[in-house]
Structures are given as structure tokens and as C-alpha cells.
Amino acid sequence: MTDVKALELQHVLQTYRRLPVVFERGEGMSLVDDHGRRYLDFVSGIGVASLGHAHPAIARAMARQAETLLHTSNLYFHPLQGELAARLASLTGLPRAFICNSGTEAVEACLKFTRRYWHGRGETGRTKYVALPHAFHGRTMGSLSVTWDEHYRAPFAPLVPGVTFAASLEPEALAAAVDEQTAAVIVEPIQGEGGVRPIPPALAQAITAACQRTGTLLIADEVQSGSWRTGSFLSSRELGLNPDAVALGKALGGGVPVGAAMVSEAIASQIAAGDHGTTYGGNLLACRAALTFLDVVDGGMLESIRRVGTYLQQRVRDLAKAHPDRVVDARGVGLFAGLELNADAQPVVIAALERGLLINRTATTVIRLLPPYIAAERDIDQAIDILGACL
Ligand SMILES: *Cc1c(COP(=O)(O)O)cnc(C)c1O
């Protein structure tokens, strides 16, 4: 620990406040630290290690792919990118994919592609974006521009111009923010970093109505809420949203960095060779990882994701009822849960770590639970028991 920490302090740019633990290996629902101590993982690397750790299918697929071919760039064809794009098209209902390496890049691509659409149609003044209070879309200049938290944005001003944040999550506020100059509205169906807040159905209806009224495109940022975390491949569909573009990431690669921007045929028809690109994006390693993730979930895991997800939501709501002095609200869908406390949640995160449970704080007062999809009811029980003791 001391060596690892000292070396990082000296040479790693100090952009992260890490918890005092060094993980050396993982196995299913567990991470193991440098003293051999086991932790039940309800963070899964912020929703990324979707099949848990060292999943045999991912391990085997990665080893085989490394022995065959990892990377060729996008100068040439390889057999896996089209296959992944086709799978994602059938899962999202959006026919075309741009494969990239992260959630931020997927959001960035959606922002660029929606503007490109209006440019292609000769409406070059239609450049504005509308985003929501509490939105988090990433840290690059474009995605940061539509991210709500002033602390993230202010030190990097000026950002991309033309971004409006709806004044509130009320339907009227959204309607007032969208006009004929809006290129796209961007929403997380369930706001993750903003505190695990599913957007209210009335707001979803207002988004659809505003987009229809003005012809504005809709981007669903499903980097955290998508890829079956809630039991559906896209949470936006459950809310009745009909996005023109969808950003995917996190769980999609099963631990390997993969993102995807999915777009409608209307958007795709305005995009030509050279409009966007990536060196790594969609390489064989990343595509193999995502295909393996899709195969494993599609191959019989969905029923358990939904059953255990429902159970998790029940247990967090019961936990909230049992601790009315500490817990203000329990929210979420499926394997994506949040407990809002009446105080900073970090002491609970640290207490849980000491008891062998990994959970995460977001939006200061919210405990976020993002277990791997392999979670069983007994894992939920164990996590809730520890969490109850910590509260
Ligand atoms: C995590 C996240 C991002 C950013 O993804 P990175 O992989 O960190 O670039 C974007 N949008 C949402 C909703 C996220 O949860």
C-alpha cells in the first residue's frame, strides 16, 4: 500500500481521491486486496465490470483474441465491428453504430452527429443543445459543456457555446428551453452521477412533445442506464422516449473500454467519410469484449438480472423505511439503485469498506449501488445487511 501510494503521489496526476485499498485480483462478485482480504463489489468499477471479475467467457475471449489479432485501425475491414454494430442495431432499434472507447466519446460523437445532421440539411444556425439539471455526460469539452455541475465546468470555461440547461425537472421548464434553434436535447433516462434519479414520466413526455413540436433531435445518454443494467437494453424505451441517437459505454465491454454512438438512418444519411474518426475505436479486442458480453447476457442471464434487480429495489426501499432517521429516499431501477441520505454519504462508504463491502457515493449524499449482473439474491442480502449496520 505505502509503495503504491507513494509512487502514485509522485507521478500520477492527482485528479482522483482514492480510497486506501489496493486491489490485486477479482473473482465473480469479489475483489481481493493486497492483504488477501475479500470485498463484495457493489460498484463494479462504476458499472463497468458487468459480468463480475475474471468472468471465464471474457477471460477466454480476450486471451484468444490477443493470440489472433488485437488492432488494425479503421483503415481496414475486420470481421468483428460490423457484427457488433448489427447486434447493437437490433438491440437499440437504431440502425448505425460508431464504435469508440468510452462513454464520453460516445456522447461527444452524438453531439457532433446531431449538429452534422442540421449542417447537412443546410440549417447551419441550428446548433444549440438543451440538457437537464443534475446531468452528467462526461469530461471532454463537448460532453462537459452539457454536464450540469458548475464545479466540473467552471474551471475550464469557455466551453461549447449554445448550451441551455432546463431551469428545473418540471415539464414546463423543459418545454421553455427547446426551440427551433435547438439541434438536440440530451438526457440520461436515469441520471447516474446526479444521484440515481430516474427522470419523471411527465418530463419524458414533455421531452418527446418538445422534440416533436420543434423537430429537435433527442440524444439518450445510456452510458450508465443502458446495456441491460435496469433489465432493459435501453431505459429510454421504458420511459416512452424515442431517441434519434444513443450513447452506450460502461457495462458494454464487460471491463474492456468500449463505447458506441447509435444513430437513426436520418442522421446517418448526413454523415460522410472523414466526418469523425478514432484510432483505437472498434478494434478487435474491444469488439470481441462487447460481443462476448452480449452473448453471455443474451445467452440466459436476462431473467436473473430482472429478478435480482427487482429484489435489490425492494431491499433498498425496505432499508430506507428501516432507517427513516438517516435515509431520505430510495431510488433506481433494476441493478441500479440509490439511497439518498440526510448527510454526506462518504462516512458510510468508508464504514462499508471496513466491513468488506464496496459501495460508492455520488452527488455528495447518495449511496449508489451498481452490482455486476451476476449478482444473486444472497449477494443482495449480504450487501444490504452490511449497509444496514453501517447506517
Ligand atoms: C460514466 C458516464 C459518462 C462518461 O463515460 P466515460 O466512460 O467515463 O467517458 C457519460 N455519461 C454518463 C451518463 C455516464 O454515467
Image (cartoon, helix red, strand yellow):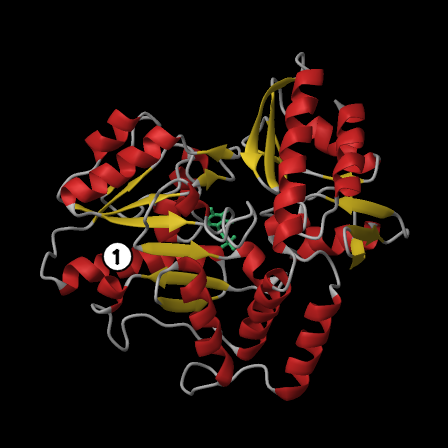
- The percent position of residue 32, horizontal first and vertical second, equals 83, 53
Few, some or many C-alpha atoms within 10 Å of disc 1 (few <14, some 14-19, many ≥20)? many
> Residue placed at 80% from the left, 41% from the top?
378
Farthest left residue in view: 122
- The percent position of residue 214, horizontal first and vertical second, equals 15, 43
- Reading the image, the residue beneath label 1 is 114
Q: Is mark 1 within 8 Å of ligand 1?
A: no
- The percent position of residue 82, horizontal first and vertical second, equals 44, 77
> Residue placed at 34% from the left, 66% from the top?
95
Residue 318 shows in the view: yes
Q: Quadrant of residue 349?
A: top right
> Residue placed at 86% from the left, 54% from the top?
34
Is disc 1 placed on a helix, strand or loop?
helix
Q: Quadrant of residue 288?
A: bottom right
> Residue placed at 35% from the left, 61% from the top?
94
Q: Quadrant of residue 100?
A: bottom left
* Viewer-nearest residue: 270 or 115: 270
Relative height, residue 182 to residue 314 (above, below) = below
Does residue 165 appear to the left or right of 347 in the view shown? left
Instruction: Please state which amino acid type lies under the numbered disc 1.
Output: Thr
Does residue 14 appear to the left or right of 261 in the view shown? right
